[in-house]
Amino acid sequence: MKSSPRINIYDLNRVANSKREREYLIHDRILMICHQKIKEAAEYGYLFAVFQVPHFLYGSPVFCIDRCTAAIISSLRRDHFTVNYVYPYKLNISWKLHDDNKEKDKIERKSKSKSDDILKRNFFSIEK
């Protein structure tokens, strides 16, 4: 009796993992571009920057801009930036320090909830 063809699930997972790793590398490249934009704005004395998440990078494979945007927002918030999402794929980034902690908490909660609501409504849920 002839055996039927088989498929190896480990190979399938290996392919999926390698695609995911490539996408993470693209996210990191775009985050580095965003960091550069922030540094340039800070050199001019600004306390904010506007960053347009690119839809593609030359020489890079296609990536999911929604996941990339969420990863950038998450990373910047982890670094204590105030980030507001503006449709489509535009980020208002602020690093202004507030003297009053209550005012800072209020502003951060308000901006985070607004941008999270917009992202959830339009695209996807992001990790908090």
Image (cartoon, rainbow, N blue to C red):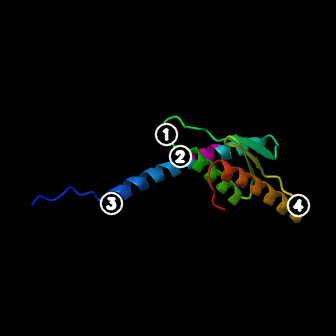
Are discs 2 and 1 less than 8 Å apart at CB?
A: yes
At 82% from the left and 43% from the top, the residue drawn is 45
Q: How far apart are marks 2 and 1 (CA)?
A: 7 Å
Tell which residue pokes out farthest to the front in this image. Answer: 1
Mark 3–mark 2 distance (CA, rounded to whole Å): 26 Å
Residues at marks 4 and 2, CA–CA distance in whole angstroms:
35 Å
Q: Give the range drawn in magenta.
A: 29-33
Type of the residue with mark 4: Glu
Crowdedness near tag 4: few (<14), some (14–19) or many (≥20) residues, C-alpha within 10 Å: few
Secondary structure, magenta segment, majority class: helix
Disc 1 from disc 3: Cα separation: 27 Å
Q: What residue is shown with label 3?
A: 9
Q: Name the residue under label 1.
A: 60
Residue 32 part of the magenta-drawn span: yes
Q: Is residue 83 magenta?
A: no
Circle 2: element type: helix
